Image (cartoon, grey):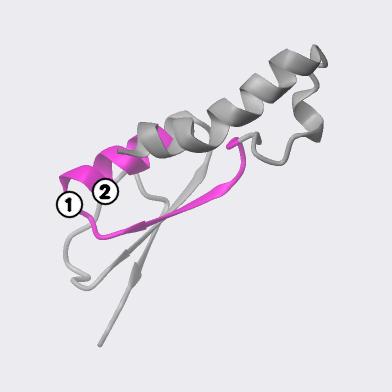
Amino acid sequence: MNDSIICHYSLPAARSIQQESTWNWANNPAVFELFEKTLLVVGVGAISSRTAQVGQALGMRVIGVRRNPQRSDPSMEQILVQIS
């Protein structure tokens, strides 16, 4: 699903740049670097843990939010506990 969201926003921008023959990605707001950005992951299930691992591999700062303070995930730099 994430791939389809990325393609939805990135492909029109890529087509436009290709047609204009400018190849200047820096001036396109739809394209940006993920390196050193912050990723907030809600929950610490299997999908969230994998998302956190991918974020780390891309050089992102990963923060997890969860309800249960007992379970942690080593792929998240910081776990914020939500008490409701």
- Of the 4 image quadrants, the one containing the N terminus is top left
Q: Residues within 10 Å of mark 1 (few under 14, many from 20)?
A: few
Q: Amino acid at mark 1?
A: Gly
- Of the 4 image quadrants, the one containing the C terminus is bottom left
Q: Which residue is under mark 2?
A: 48
* Image point (36%, 38%), residue name: 2
Please tell me which residue lies in front, 71 or 66: 66
Membership of 3 in magenta stretch:
no
Image-quadrant location for residue 53: top left
Please tell me which residue lies in front, 63 or 32: 32
Residue 72 point in image, percent of width and height: 23, 56
CB-based contact (under 8 Å), mark 1 and mark 2: yes
Q: Amino acid at mark 2?
A: Ser
8 vs 20, left or right, is: left
Residue 20 point in image, percent of width and height: 80, 17
Look at the picture and state if 36 lies above or below 82: above
Look at the picture and state if 43 lies above or below 19: below
Q: Which residue is under mark 1?
A: 45
Residue 26 point in image, percent of width and height: 79, 30
Residue stretch rendered in magenta on the structure: 34-55
Q: Residues within 10 Å of mark 2 (few under 14, many from 20)?
A: some
